[in-house]
Image (spheres, helix red, strand yellow):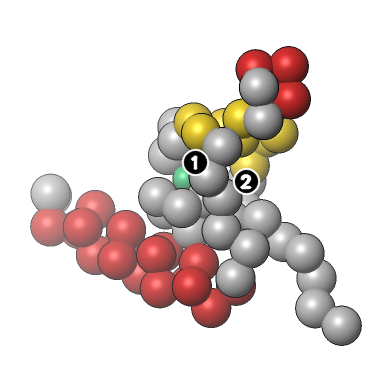
Amino acid sequence: MRDKVKFCPRCGSKNLNYMPWLGERYVCKDCGYQGALIVEDGEFAEEIRKKFEAEDKEEE
Ligand SMILES: [Zn+2]
């Protein structure tokens, strides 16, 4: 049985705050993403995280 872990669709982080009082909204503590869309696929989240970190390095 797989865990239902929720990931940020922007940076792949697991540090999501659920804000139901804002209307089914999640807020990422790592990149500041806010929205209803989240990722529940760990492998997909890993891909997102790799891309996000790669883009982060290019900006330096
Ligand atoms: Zn994020």
The type of residue carrying mark 1 is Asp
**Mark 1 residue CB less than 8 A from any atom of ligand 1:** yes
Could you tell me if residue 13 is visible in this image? no
Could you tell me if residue 47 is visible in this image? yes
The type of residue carrying mark 2 is Asn
Residue 12, image x, y percentages: 48, 58
Image vertical order of residue 10 relative to residue 20, above or below? below
The quarter holding residue 6 reads bottom right
Q: Write the residue at 31% across / 61% down.
A: 53
Task: Give neighbour class at mark 1: few <14, some 14-19, many 20+ (Cα, 10 Å).
Answer: some
Q: Write the residue at 13% across / 49% down.
A: 60
- Left or right of 28 in this view: 53: left
Image vertical order of residue 18 relative to residue 58, above or below? above
Mark 2 in CB contact with mark 1 (< 8 angstroms): yes
State the residue lying farthest toward the right.
1
Circle number at residue 30:
1
State the residue lying farthest toward the bottom.
1
Image vertical order of residue 60 relative to residue 44, above or below? above
Sooner in the amino-acid sequence: mark 2 or mark 1: 2
Residue at image mark 2: 15
Task: Give neighbour class at mark 2: few <14, some 14-19, many 20+ (Cα, 10 Å).
Answer: some
Image vertical order of residue 1 relative to residue 27, above or below? below
